[in-house]
Image (cartoon, rainbow, N blue to C red):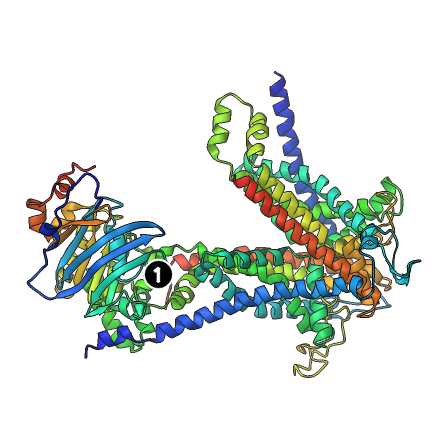
Amino acid sequence: MDVGKYNLNENNILNFSPEEHEIAIATQNLEVFYGKKQAIFNGNLQFERYRITSLIGASGSGKSTYLRSLNRMNDDIAQVKGKIIYRGLDVNSPKINVYEMRKHIGMVFQRPNPFSKSIRSNITFALKQNGIKDKQRLNQIVESSLKDAALWDEVKDDLDKSAWALSGGQQQRLCIARTIAMKPDILLLDEPASALDPISTSKIEETLIELKKKYTIIIVTHNMQQASRISDYTAFFHLGHILEYDKTKHLFTTPKITATNDYISGNFG
Amino acid sequence: MDPIKNKIQNSSRETRQDLLGKILSYSCILLIVLVVLSIFFFVASKGIATFTVDHGNFWTFLTGKTWNPIVNNAKGQPEIGALPMIVGSFGVTILAALFATPFAIGTALYMTELASKRGERLLQSVVELLVGIPSVVYGFIGLSVIVPFVRNHFGGSGYGILSGSFVLFVMILPTITSMTVDSLRSVPRFYKEASLALGATKWQTIYKVILRSATSGILTAIIFGMARAFGEALAVQMVIGNAAVMPKNLLSSASTLTSILTMGIGNTVMGTVGNNALWSLALVLLLMSLLFNILVRLIGRKGRM
Amino acid sequence: MKTKIQNRIALTTIRIIALLVVFILMFLLGDILIAGVPHISWHFLTAPSQSFTSGGGIGVQLFNSIYLLFLTLIISFPISLGAGIFLAEYAPKNFLTATVRMAIEVLSSLPSVVVGLFGFLLFVVQMKMGFSIIAGAIALTFFNLPLLTRNIEESLTAVPDLQREAGMALGLSKWRTVTRIVLPEALPGIITGVVLGAGRVFGEAAALIYTAGQSATNIDFTQWNPLNSASPLNLMRPAETLAVHIWKINSEGVMPDASAVSAGSSAVLIIAVLFFNLLARLLGNALYRKLTATKNR
């Protein structure tokens, strides 16, 4: 196994699995290829329900690729092999209805991407497509998901304004609200705060900690403070391999391998 | 049974929508491809009939100077000498490109290298408006302005290749200009900056650096212009005189493939030699337009290397 | 010193050339408008044309042009929308797609007279439609399709992939994502392209001479049943457009005021083109502003 200069004793690290609750989603031998180039090797992880799991690693380590594979957002651009187990099904099979699957495994992206519609429509659009027509119910969902995303107080009087008029941090929280309005099981976040200022970032972090009461959250971040502040578990990615996976406090205080230690102490590369 | 698990395994509204979308968009593109194929098929089958059904001689077609398809020549073959039209078409096209190229490059250079933002925007609108003027209007102006002008200053009747070239010059000028502008804009800034920093004058920079690296783009632009000129029908037809004889000079009445075609189709009966011969001219037009396309591709490939 | 003089001469030449091009346009517009505008009157715009006597108008031709444009857009927009969506969203990167693209490029560079003759052969002769407005509209569609398709493809491609991902991640189908999220954002560009294309279609004549025909039959503007042969809406009647009319009277017109009628018609055509240009810009800007700013509903 080529993982740069680091030696790896597999048994030690990857046998870890969370035990307190049931598993929301897991991957078995996930491999991702961009053309001939392999981006993910042997991806085995289990994610615990109602917990936040961080995926950390240098850029190019494959953490985003891995995350995007979980709800099949990579289908068009990459080849994904291996199993993704969700509700006892391998959702990486071609027989799976990816649209239904994505309704339960939502995703928020690195850069805020609200639709060019009003704040309200941003949230109700997908719901209406799903057949929810009742106005009162829609309004209710708009309010509750905006409250969950900690955006309600800031926008409650401007629900019909264009979402593009919001600040970047507000837009990102709107994107979170839009995703949780679908009542997903799992929330995937791909560096959701990397394009934002510190105040917006901390707001989003607070939101996420609130949200884990209802959702399983998997977040990719390059910000190690962020990972240690909000997540229960952390997986460390390096050159497409998952080198270490542990409770966040263990991984950050007593990493089992040098690579993790080098990365979290900033001596990387 | 887990309802979510169930839903994930079955098709839904979304799967049906996607199937519909695929069917719709694929059939639209298929329709366009079908149109292109049938244009080639129909025009080619009609155009070839002159040689297969009516026993026209292909060599006569390309080199013969007498165009009178309904009459047979000494060998009993129809008189389908298309050389006058071929010469006419190439004549106006090449002349128009010769006139237009310096103007187009000059204007494009002004827009990209010399003009202020406002000047650039003004020229941009000028170019857009020139593109927008319909060809019959160009033809009408040619008829009312250029033909008398040529008659008074160069002699002859005023109808002929020169007048046709003048009209086409204005018509292809905007085409060549706007494409040249695009290729000049794609020259990396630092080429220019490096040259200026080395002490070269603006003109030296333009001539030795900018024009050199935009050459293939400019060539493409000229070929696009020529393709437009070659295929233009009405504007040329209105000023060239439409005599299917070898042009003696630039001032004598001449004809192009398009002009004989537009004049003739209405006056011949479908399926006759006279009509089929006209379709052969259309086939030449079609093949030329294909050739221009291939040329553009070849230049593009070379430019990228 | 020599290079400096050379520099000055060259740059001045470039400036003069640019100025000349501006003059050419001003001369063209001036010539057409000065010669033509005095002939434009309400009578000229609404009266039927005369073949042998003076005082004819362009009422029927003007209506034909507009009706034909309308029909062409109705036919060509949905097809190019589908094709544009295919190229921007569905097309796999393979040899077949490259061939399709090449076919569209070839279609866009075909001489319009050839497209017109094909329409003549297929619709007027083979399908026995005769010179008819519908044959003309189809020929113009062939002429308009490649440009519109390319414009729609470009406008769609300009919408960031982030928007597609947003839709997909919410479990929307690709088709819904494209039609309800990407398409509305591409609309300013698409509308601009459609209107500019409309200007081109409005002025096109070569593709129409042998499809929509060269005669303006009398239309009864009180008869709006499309099945009646005198109805303006009848699809099977021959319909000379304004652009064809200009060509026709200059090639074989025998009315005494032929040059006045063509000058007036040219002016109307140019004004229409200017109008389409302006409209394209205004609509594009307005839609763009609407897209990014407040919305009340």
Q: Which residue of the protein is positioned furthest toward the top in this rendering? A: C1
Image side of residue C10 versus residue B272, left or right: left
Identify the chain of the residue marked 1, using the numbered disc in the image.
A
State the image quarter where residue C16 is shown: top right
Image side of residue C190 versus residue B91, left or right: left
Image side of residue B6 versus residue B120, left or right: left
Q: Quick one: C42 or A81, which is closer to the camera? A: A81
In the figure, A40 relative to B279: above or below? Answer: above
In the figure, C20 relative to B236: above or below? Answer: above
In the image, what residue occupies the spot 19% across and 79% down?
B1
State the image quarter where residue B45 is shown: bottom right
Image spot of residue A34 (x, y percent): 34, 52
Under circle 1, the secondary element is loop
Screen quadrant of the C terminus of chain A: top left
Image spot of residue B30 (x, y percent): 54, 67
Q: Which residue is mark 1?
A: A115
Q: Quick one: B11 or A146, which is closer to the camera? A: B11
Image spot of residue C223 (x, y percent): 68, 82
In the image, what residue occupies the spot 78% across and 45% down?
B91
Q: Quick one: B107 or C218, which is closer to the camera? A: B107
In the image, what residue occupies the spot 64% across and 29% down?
C12
Asked whether the viewer can see residue A170, the reply is: no
